[in-house]
Each structure stands twice: as C-alpha cells, then as structure tokens.
Image: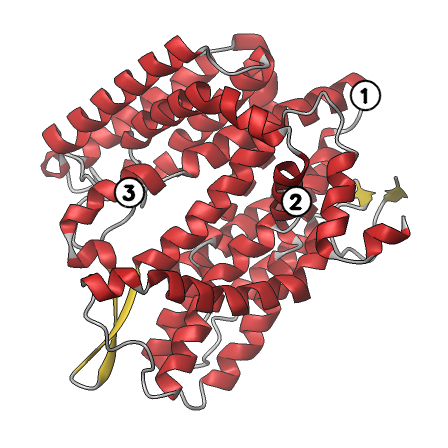
Amino acid sequence: MEQTKRTVWSRALYVADQTPESRNRLIDFLRAFSILIVVFGHWLAAVPFVVNGELTLSHALELDDKLHFLTWAIQIMPIFFMVGGYSNALSLKSVYRKGGKRRTWLAARYVRLMTPIIPFLIVWSILVPLLAVGVEPGLLKLASQAAAVPLWFLSVYLLAVALAPWTYKAWLKWRWRTLWVPALLAVVADVFRVNPDWASWATYPSWFNYLFVWLTVHQIGYAWAERGKELSVPKGVIALLVGYAALILLTVVGPFPVALVGVDSEAISNTTPPSIVLFAQTIIQIGWISVLSGPIKRLLSQRNVWATVVLISGMIMSLYVWHMTAMVLTIGAGTLLGNLGFSIDPLSQTWWLTRPVWFAVLLVPLLIFVAIFGRHEQKAGTGETSPRPLALGIGVLISAIGLGSSAAFGIASDEGFPLRWWVPLALIIGTFLTGMFTLFPERSKR
C-alpha cells in the first residue's frame, strides 16, 4: 500500500491491477478518450489573434466553413450520454437488486457530479470581482461565459440522471418504445424549427430537444447494458453506412448545417438546442465502437495502457470543468505579455504547425488546476445521504438551472454588480436541498 502513495502513476497502476475481469474496460476508455477529444477540440477551435494591435477572439469554424466537416469526427457528446446510460443502468440494477433507495442513489450521483464544480464556482466567484477592477465588463462576461461553457453538458446530464430511476424502469417495461417516443418528439420539434414561417413560436419547441435528443441517446445506453456487448463487426459496418447516409441527407442535402457544433453564423444550430442530426451521429458512433471494440479491448488488456485510462478516468470531471478556464487565463496572460503568440495569421500553415505548442502551453495551467482540485473529485461519493424526495427533486432542478444559466450567460455580469450572483446562489441552494451540504443529513457511512 505504501507504494501506491508515491506517485500518481503508481496509484493508477495499483488501481489498474485491482480491476476485476468482469469490468467492461471499453466503457472507461470511451469516457477517457471522449474527454480528451472535447478538451483538445475546444482548444483547437479557439482562435485568438491580433488585428491592428488589438486582440480579437474568433472561432476556427467561423473563419473557414470547410472545417465544418471536421466536427463529424470530434462531436462525441453522444458517446457521453450512451456511456452514461450504460453505467446508470448497471448501477440502478444493483440498487434494485439490493433493495436500495432511488433517492440515495440519485443523491450519490449528484454529489459525484457536483463535487468538482464547487471549487470552480468558488474560484470564479472570487475572480470576477477582482478582475472587474481592471477588465472591461463585456470582456469579463465573455471570459466567464467561455470558462463556464462546459457546464451545459452537466446541466442536461444531471436532469438525465435525475430521471434515470424512472426511465430505466420504463425501459424494463416497454423497451424500445421508451426510445422511440422522445426520438419522435425531437423530430416533431425539428420539423417546426426548420419551418419557422409556420408560426411565430415555431422555433420554441426545439429547445425541448435538450431532453428529447439526449434522453433518446441515454436510453440507447440502457439497451447496450442489457445486451452486455457491442454489435458485431458486420452490423457495425451497416450502422456506419446508415449513419453517414442519414448525416449527409440531413446536412449536405437537407436543411441542417454541416457543423455538428454551434456556429454563430448559421441560422440553425445542431447543438443549441440539439437537433435530430445528432441521432445520425449516434448511429455512426455505435458503428465505430462496434467495429473497433475488439482491437481496443485487446489494447486495454495491456497493463500500462489500462493504467493510463484509469489515470485519466480519475480526473475526468476536473479536466472537463477546468479546461476552458485554463485557456481563458492563458489568453489573458498572453495579452499582458504584449499579445505574445497571437500574431500568427489564423489557420495559416504556421498556425496549424504551432497548435501542438498551443496545446502544450494550455496543458500547464490545466494540470495545475487538476493537481489542486482533482483530489476533491476522487473523494466524491464517500458517504451516502438520503434527503427527502421533494427537496432532492427541487435541489437537482435548481442546480441544473444554475449550471445551464452559467453556461448560457456566464458568471460575470456586464452591468451593475460584476458577479451574476444568482448563478452560484442557485447551486448553493441546490447542494443544500439535495443533502450534499445539509446541516441535518440522514447519513450513513459505507
């Protein structure tokens, strides 16, 4: 045991060696791989550059629409929701088998999701008033919004987790009908979205797709967990062909944009809110997972490879929550140093060749944040709380609203008091209602 305290790597090796043979290592790999794609994808898309002596912040997809096809490879959010559904199904199955309480399960899941977010909110709640002294309000709002953008996923996923005890029960009873219902509702919402001339309110139903689309994908995770394995290679190839055909018909031929992430210049977004195009992307990713699962699992049987996945998995939420803050603060530091590194022409050959340097620079503050705050993530869920159902439900809803609001509007305000105070307040209230920091918890140690 003493050896496991020496280094982060030795601890990862120790945990890797304790992995039971029954564990589906592919699930952990997909989660770790996806988070790296998200982090480096966001960093690649950001394009800070100097115009007439002043720093301009742009997006690679805004500067060259040919790059929109690149998002077909890096839009991996369906994997997160499928893997989440898979994990939640196995966890709930165990809870029901042991006669556990749904509220205890949900409270534990809430703690695991929210624990890495609390330090983030504290840091930004301190940073915003401090930076407001010398930073223009609009710029500070943009910076805090960029840093909080990743929280949109946690907002939606938190709702999916909150509904999981019921959606899983529904899956056990009605199977695939629980998938087709939200999928069809998403289709109806998108029919109105692409035909806004039908009525002045036509685009509003599409905002429900945050639940319709992602709950559909989450349900697929239940099916995966019940099946216990991936599709065969031939079926995976068929899924790829069907998925890419649907993607081309919906985007290149149809009314939806090619980019699978939000682009401000596009009239319709495939992610804000999500569109049915992401169903095609989900089918594609099911295909790739099925085709490549064999080689990946063989690779994961190697000790060092599996230990690397374990290492990333232990800090996955911290990487996700802090990676945009690392970029925002690095850009801020670069401006203080005379716009150091921002004079390269965007998307030029030199710009592309220097992206590895850009990644390496951003990794420094990110790893510092992970080293400081990652330990809180690893200790999350060490106890159990069983709050009252009504308080738990309200707390989860308020927390989801707070997370979504911070992602949509930022933590800083560009008028009046610099801190958008109701964002951290909503999350504080949510954590108390769910029993995470309650003064009188009904707690039992594991």
Q: Secondary structure at mark 1?
A: loop
Q: Residues within 10 Å of mark 1 (few under 14, many from 20)?
A: few
Mark toward the viewer: 1 or 3: 3
The residue identified by callout 3 is 71
Determine whether, in the image, residue 88 is placed left or right of residue 294.
Answer: right
The residue at the point 47 percent across, 41 percent down is 34
Label 2 Cα neighbours within 10 Å, binned few <14 / some 14-19 / many ≥20: many
The answer to whether mark 3 and mark 2 are in CB contact below 8 A is no
Given the image, on which type of amino acid does mark 2 rest? Tyr
Which colour assignment does the render follow?
Answer: secondary structure
Real-space CA distance between mark 2 and mark 1, rounded to the nearest whole angstrom = 20 Å
Residue 115 rendering spot, x and y as whole percentages: 67, 54
Viewport quadrant of the C terminus: top right
Question: Residue 385 versus residue 387: which sits nearer the camera?
Answer: 385
Q: Nearer the viewer, residue 201 or 129?
A: 129
**Can the viewer see residue 328?**
yes
The disc placed on residue 99 is 1
Q: Label 1 is placed on what type of residue?
A: Gly
Who comes first in sequence, dot 2 or dot 1? 1
Label 2, secondary structure: give it: helix
Q: Quick check: 371 left or right of 340?
A: right
* Residue 321 horizontal side relative to residue 353, left or right: right
The residue lying at 59 percent from left, 55 percent from top is: 318
Residue density around tag 3, few if under 14, some if 14–19, many if 20 or more, within 10 Å: some
Camera-near label (3 vs 2) is: 3
Considering only vertical position in the picture, is 399 above or below 351?
A: above
Q: Which mark is residue 110?
A: 2
What is the distance, in whole Å, between disc 3 and disc 2 at their CAs? 30 Å
